[in-house]
Amino acid sequence: MAALRLGYRSVVLEKSAECPAAATAECLVGDWNSADDLFRLAERVDVLTLENEFVDAAHLAKLEAAGHKLWPTSRSIALVQDKLIQKQTLLDAGIPVPGMRGIADLAELESAVEELGLPLVLKARRNGYDGKGNATIRTSKEIASAWQQLRGDQGNALYVEEFCPFVSELAVVITRGLDGATVVYPLVETVQKDHVCNIVRAPAMVAEDIAAQAKQIALGAIEAVGAVGTFAVEMFLRNDGGIVVNELAPRVHNSGHYTIEACACSQFENHVRAVLGLPLGSSHMVAPHAVMVNLLGKYQGTGTALGLDRALAVAGANLHLYGKTTTSAGRKMGHVTALGKTSEEAERAAVACAEAISFQPVSNHDA
Ligand SMILES: Nc1ncnc2c1ncn2[C@@H]1O[C@H](COP(=O)(O)OP(=O)(O)O)[C@@H](O)[C@H]1O
Ligand SMILES: [Mg+2]
């Protein structure tokens, strides 16, 4: 949508012609795991970009070698898409991260528990999102079940990291241009429910020195992976006052959706500008506060939204429905952003609108 508004046409590679992006872009049906399909896409466009970190970096490198322009680069994606390599890269660059180590088998997991103590978080090195690649181990009884849950027994590459007791989770979205110029969006607070982002509050209400420190850490993190385009840096504000990076996203991010209404130039438009080599826009907030609430699916159902009359009656709430054709528990179906003089005012409107929306369940008859 941001590219279209600037007069550009987009082509997306997606598994189904019914994908939400088909409403604004031409949809090439295919599989991003297939190098052939990636080349089919590349041949259609002047510049390639990504909106997830799951496309294999080795395939992306082949596109670059064939002369296709890709931002962010395959090298950046290689450094981010494997969470263990990502954390090692950050550590090497002097960025604070939780203690972690790779785990090759169950015996190694058991000895990691011995040495590091509990709780620990076992994570899939690749393809995790919305907490789906994570299992928290709180007691030694949970070691084997966590290993199985994340398919360690089937060869899925895993690592463990220290559990970080935190006061809050913070995030910074940054766009970095082809020339290295950066635009930093305000530090936000994110609230996760069952490991899925539920609420984002902008700006985060933390002391100035914390916000300044978080910004410096986030800038260092995206420099360390050679970012081009919009990236997000998720952080923990630990109970002891320290900040550590949880993870990077090499793409536009849920913690930046509020920028559509709340900032002079959104994370999406700045991403488009960055990958096209255009000047970046301002990240300045146009209201004192903004709150974004995700619309998460609660059960299996169709993508048809119910409750629009009540939701749209909430003054100041901006409803975004993504047009996904099915819903399921925890699936991101849309979001609501509200602006306000205070964070409470914005949150009241965003929550009231979000709570009015539900998605049509699949009836017992259909199931
Ligand atoms: N080391 C950790 N300590 C405490 N909580 C964690 C840790 N790692 C992840 N979490 C919790 O799980 C959420 C999702 O984890 P994350 O690694 O960001 O995975 P995803 O890629 O699914 O977003 C985090 O936002 C946080 O709430
Ligand atoms: Mg995350």
Image: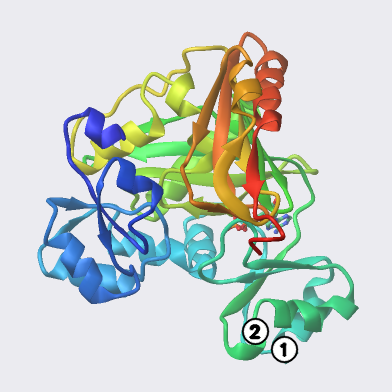
Which of the two residues, 276 or 198, is positioned nearer the viewer here?
198
Give how far across and how far down residue 80 sits, in percent.
44, 61
Looking at the rendered image, the quarter that the N terminus falls into is top left
Q: Is disc 1's CB within 8 Å of ligand 1?
A: no
Q: Position of residue 302 (x, y in %)?
A: 57, 51
Is 247 or 92 nearer to us in this picture? 247
Q: From the viewer's perspective, is 122 left or right of 66?
A: right
Number of other residues with Cα within 10 Å of mark 1, as a class: few under 14, some 14 to 19, many 20 or more: some
Under tag 2, what secondary structure? helix
Residue 299 visible here: yes
Q: Quadrant of residue 342?
A: top right
Q: In the current view of this chain or complex, which residue is farthest to the front? A: 365
Rendered image quadrant of residue 224: bottom left
**Image location (x, y in percent) of residue 291:** 61, 25
Quadrant of the drawing holding the C terminus:
bottom right
The spot of residue 125 in percent (x, y) is 55, 71
The secondary element bearing badge 1 is classed as: helix
| Residue annotated with mark 1 | 106
Amino acid type, label 2? Gly
- Left or right, 65 with respect to 335, comes to left
The residue indicated by pointer 2 is: 152
Q: Is residue 217 visible?
A: no
Q: Nearer the viewer, residue 313 or 37?
A: 313
From what the image shows, is residue 63 above or below residue 109?
A: above
Q: Quadrant of residue 205?
A: top right
Q: What distance separates the C-alpha of mark 1 from that of mark 2?
A: 8 Å
Mark nearer the N terminus (1 vs 2): 1
Residue type at mark 1: give it: Leu
- Quick check: marks 1 and 2 in contact, CB under 8 Å? yes
Q: Residue at x 30, y 33 (%)?
A: 2
Which residue is at 23% across, 34% downward? 4
Classify mark 2: residues with Cα within 10 Å, few (<14), some (14-19) or many (20+). many
